[in-house]
Amino acid sequence: MDTSDRLKIRAYVVEMLADRGDLQAFDDEDSLIESARLDSLAVVKLVTFLESTFDVDFGEIEFDPQRFDSVELLAAMVEESRG
Amino acid sequence: MKPRTWRLPPIETYPRAVAVVQTVWGKLLLLAVFALVLKTLVNLSLQMTVSAALVAMAGRHRMKVALAAAVALLLREPYWYGYGELDEAILIQAGLGDRVSNEILRGSTWLLCAPVAFLALILARRFRSHAIGKRVVLLQHAVCLGLIGFASSHILTGMPQALLWSVTLTLTAYFWYLAYALVGQSRKNPPSLVAHFATFHPFFAPHTMVPFGKGALDWLNVEAKDTDALARTQLKGLKLLVWAFLLRTLQWGLQRVIYVGLGVPPLNGAFREFLDSGQAPALSFASLVFNFPDQLLSMAVMGHAFIATARLAGFGMLRNTYRPLSSRSIAEFWNRYFFYFKELMVHIYFYPTYLRWFKSYPRLRMAFATFMAAGVGNFFFHFLQEEKTLVARGPWETALGMETYVFYCVVLVAGIVISQLRGHRIDPSAGWWRRQFFPSLWVAIFYGFLSFFDSTRVLVDLDQHFGFLSQVVGIEPWIRAIG
């Protein structure tokens, strides 16, 4: 996947965490949902973000909240949506 | 000014504590302390602790042992869902009261239900790409309502009718566990059937319709992968249990002071007296005010005890209640107060709605999905809980009788939608009072008011609820004057 796309995803996640007052650093592989740093409302925001920014269609690829757990998994979903 | 937060020491990060818990004596000490503290909080504490210990020791066979523990729990209390009374009512209704025993009905029911659930999971996997398979939980709703309608129509008679009601109510008791399992079966890599069945009657959270820990996929996702992780998870479990004990002690102290010392009647008692006499007892306003923190503490204690036991078994699940009074928005509180109920509603109703409906209208999309989760799903969950009324009066009358809960759902949905659409960005320049205290206070007042409609009997008319409220807050004479 394009590095700039991964950076876009990362920047969005950083912004979401900052909105919640969470300024802790994290790696692309770090868990965000299972570690409770983000909740199901954040998953919804990420759905909207992936749809609008990368044209991801969740009618075409599998929707599984566990796939929103890290930047790496989000990037993989974008990759999958592009076939 | 900002109050300091106090936390229990992070024992799971102490290398020495982690090492001790991995020794035989350390494990025994941990289990002994755990069992002792758990005994003060829940029934079945010994069975829960022993089950958790066996599951923790089972390593990669954890889910198989969890299934055995679930079966053991069910054998010990086969009538957990009020089945004793229900079976009796069903048998009397079918004219079999003196001819068929509860035991025969219950045994036959389990023999029928297990293959039905098994078949449902197999079919969900087999047809996961089919249009119906993609809406398998919707189909589950239709089947459930169809069974309730069929049973209440009394087309069948005698033993077939009794069995139909009994099977239907058993499937409704496990409805939400089956829903998670059906969703899990549609995933690329579904868990085994053993894992699904282990989650249907969690050994750490017995006798609840809400799947604490969610489905098998989620259990497997958070299980400790090595002995070090297991030790840390167990220590986190112990810490959570101690926290539950402290909260229970606080609740006990408050109840002694408020209910015994000051003579304030518990809210349910005060409301019952109002229904009997038309007059709310003295100090009912205090009952109303204290009911909310009392309810919060009960929820926290129960959830912490359950999740602590899951952690003892090696499942690093998230807490059910997490600092609800620090919520700055109504949506945030819903997430923090009863996490696993909210997750259930989000997974079964919110996500599917959000992914399919009103994609071009972001605000409407969010509002409609919230309505489906906090409104429709929430109502349906409580509708299924009214099992005795369903048998006695049928589904239509049961639904009509739940107007108070409809009101609760409508106000909750409105509150959450407004709170979500407004957002709650933190203004770093605002002081603690403006940034944290006042928003949290407003949220607590909102839920404090709403909890009255949730914690009293939902089948009592809304008029009666407002009648009580108007007396308690002293506006009844004004309402009478207006006519």
Image (tube, helix red, strand yellow):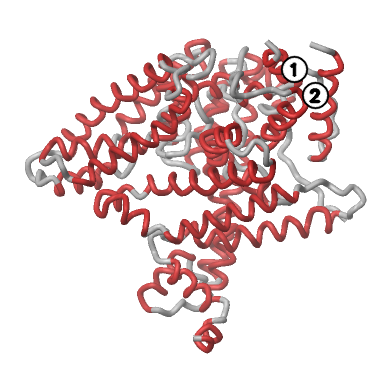
Say above or below: B258 vs B150: below
Do residues under tags 1 and 2 come within 8 Å of each other at their CB atoms? yes
How many angstroms separate mark 1 from mark 2 (CA)? 7 Å
Between B390 and B15, the residue placed more toward the observer is: B390
Same chain under badges 1 and 2? The reply is yes
For label 1, the residue is A75
Q: Is residue B228 left or right of residue B292?
A: right
Residue B175: horizontal and vertical position, in percent?
39, 35
Outermost residue toward the bottom in this view: B481
Ranked by sequence position, the earlier of labels 1 and 2 is: 2
* Residue lying at 81% horizontally and 49% vertically, measured from the top left: B4
Mark 1 is on which residue type? Ala
Q: Chain of mark 1?
A: A
Residue B361 occupies quadrant: top right
Between B342 and B32, the residue placed more toward the observer is: B342
Mark 2 is on which residue type? Ile
Residue B479: horizontal and vertical position, in percent?
53, 83
- Tell me if mark 2 has few (under 14), some (14-19) or many (20+) residues whose alpha carbon lies within 10 angstroms of its own: many
Specify whether residue B336 is in view.
Answer: no
* Residue lying at 49% horizontally and 25% vertically, measured from the top left: B183
Outermost residue toward the right in this view: B429
Say above or below: B244 vs B356: below
For label 2, the residue is A9
State the SS at label 1.
helix
* Residue lying at 64% horizontally and 45% vertically, measured from the top left: B364
Between A30 and A75, the residue placed more toward the observer is: A75
